[in-house]
Image (cartoon, rainbow, N blue to C red):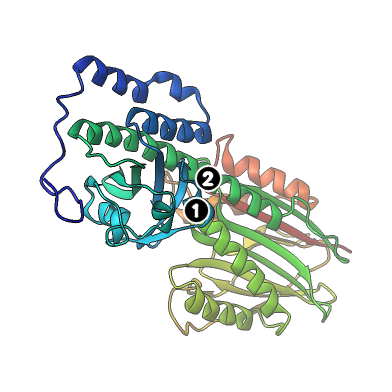
């Protein structure tokens, strides 16, 4: 039975009209192992096409929740392309698709009109009846899959079962697709921001390394070296908490903001104070550690400010490697108004400074202080490229890193 708007409230029509053989055939078309050999994009489209055919519908559409969980947007369709092209969005809890997402249960409407749907595409395409089911992954609703028909009909319980089965496969494919796209975008962003070769700067020899973590993938680690109008050279290494595309995007914004603030002041503590204020205001959920250092025009000294980051390693031309004695302040984004400090250290001709992220020294099997002690032991004299090679080989022990590693070595030339 249905109410005056056509919403089915007391179950769906009986599926007795579909014999067991036909029901089995329909299930096999959705669980077909041949589908597994398709690429993610082709798999998603093929599942939508099959859903249309098996349910005798004119359209099949996937709407996914946005990052805030408050809106649905059309992301894939077969037969209702207008919804995707126009970026139609539906608030959760409102309209047909929004109700399916809010209730996390199937819903059918026999007679579509402006009172029970919000998508103008459904009305313009003369969709009369719709059936929607939630897409659920790990117990969480991630979107809605629905089919629409241009002729009035009442969907059966068997139709609901079939569409839910399709939705489960679509949810898995959608998550895999999103992960793949995010990783590709994060890798592209990292490569655009982290050139494999550092710039050539008078009085310095530089080398860098960046390796994404095998377990977490691309994250928010970064390095940067740039000349300033004053003749100083800015050097930064940092690590945004988290991984994936969001961490990489936040990293890009933080890196760009640091460069902008570096043009306004030569005091590293002042730069990190401004950067912290920016993060507190515009990246309220972000947190990052960083070391920002400024080399003097004659390269004889370096002024360093540390925002909760592992300490740099200094290697004099005639002495052992050591951790730079720099006061560690709170990470960026940790606490509003955190006080920051700068420390100036001499760098003799031939001296080497090593900046890195915690993926180089931290392991589950050893505390970070043991990793720092190991790092100091393995840093040897040589040109920066050789120093990086030696450090990476010794610290990784021929194992893939579990976390991102960013490494920057600079040496003052004679």
Crowd band around label 1 with a 10 angstrom C-alpha radius: few (<14), some (14–19), many (20+): many
Which image quadrant: the N terminus?
top left
Observer-nearest residue: 43 or 279? 43
Q: Is residue 298 left or right of residue 393?
A: right
Q: Is residue 72 left or right of residue 296?
A: left
Residue 201 placed where, x, y %?
Answer: 85, 64
Displayed quadrant of residue 62: top left
- Mark 1–mark 2 CB contact (< 8 Å): yes
Q: CA distance from mark 1 to mark 2?
A: 7 Å
Residue at left offset 49%, top offset 53%: 243
Q: Which residue is mark 1?
A: 243
Residue 205 placed where, x, y %?
Answer: 82, 58
Q: Would you say residue 287 is visible in this rendering?
A: yes
Which image quadrant: the C terminus?
bottom right
Residue at left offset 23%, top offset 50%: 104
Residue at left offset 51%, top offset 48%: 403
For residue 192, above or below residue 45: below
Residue at left offset 82%, top offset 61%: 350
Q: Would you say residue 213 is visible in this rendering?
A: no
Marker count (numbered): 2
> Could you tell me which secondary element the residue under label 2 belongs to?
loop
Res 217 label: 2
For residue 304, above or below residue 379: below
Observer-nearest residue: 102 or 318? 102
Residue 331 placed where, x, y %?
Answer: 49, 71
Displayed quadrant of residue 65: bottom left
> Could you tell me which secondary element the residue under label 1 belongs to?
strand
Displayed quadrant of residue 117: bottom left
Crowd band around label 2 with a 10 angstrom C-alpha radius: few (<14), some (14–19), many (20+): some
């Amino acid at each position: 039975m249905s109410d005056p708007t056509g919403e089915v409230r007391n179950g769906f029509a009986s599926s007795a009209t579909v014999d067991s053989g036909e029901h089995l055939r329909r299930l096999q078309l959705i669980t077909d192992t041949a589908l597994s050999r398709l690429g993610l994009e082709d798999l998603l489209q093929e599942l939508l096409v099959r859903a249309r055919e098996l349910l005798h519908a004119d359209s099949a559409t996937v709407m996914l929740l946005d990052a805030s969980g408050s809106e649905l947007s059309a992301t894939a369709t077969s037969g209702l392309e207008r919804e995707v092209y126009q970026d139609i969005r539906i608030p959760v809890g409102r309209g047909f698709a929004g109700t399916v997402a809010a209730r996390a249960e199937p819903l059918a409407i026999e007679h579509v009109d402006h009172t029970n749907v919000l998508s103008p595409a459904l009305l313009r395409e003369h969709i009369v009846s719709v059936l929607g089911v939630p897409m659920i992954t790990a117990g969480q609703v991630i979107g809605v899959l629905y089919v629409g028909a241009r002729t009035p009909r009442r969907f059966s319980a068997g139709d609901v079962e079939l569409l839910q089965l399709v939705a489960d496969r679509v949810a898995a494919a959608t998550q895999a697709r999103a992960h793949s796209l995010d990783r590709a975008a994060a890798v592209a962003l990292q490569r655009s921001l982290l050139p494999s070769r550092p710039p050539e700067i008078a009085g310095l020899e530089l080398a860098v390394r960046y390796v994404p973590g095998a377990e977490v993938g691309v994250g928010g680690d970064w390095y940067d070296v740039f000349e300033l109008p004053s003749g100083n050279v800015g050097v930064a290494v940092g690590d945004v908490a988290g991984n994936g595309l969001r961490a990489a995007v936040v990293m890009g914004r933080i890196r760009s903001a640091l460069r902008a603030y570096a043009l306004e002041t030569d005091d590293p503590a002042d730069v990190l104070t401004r950067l912290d204020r920016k993060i507190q205001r515009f990246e309220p959920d972000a947190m990052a550690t960083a070391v920002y250092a400024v080399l003097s025009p004659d390269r004889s000294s370096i002024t360093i400010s540390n925002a909760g980051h592992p300490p740099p390693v200094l290697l004099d031309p005639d002495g052992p490697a050591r951790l730079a004695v720099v006061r560690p302040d709170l990470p960026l984004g940790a606490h509003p108004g955190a006080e920051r400090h700068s420390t100036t250290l001499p760098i003799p001709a031939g001296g080497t400074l090593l900046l890195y992220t915690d993926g180089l020294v931290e392991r589950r099997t050893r505390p970070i202080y043991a990793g720092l002690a190991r790092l100091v032991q393995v840093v040897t004299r040589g040109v920066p490229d050789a120093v990086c090679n030696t450090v990476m080989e010794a610290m990784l022990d021929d194992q893939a890193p579990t976390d991102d590693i960013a490494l920057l070595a600079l040496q003052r030339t004679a």
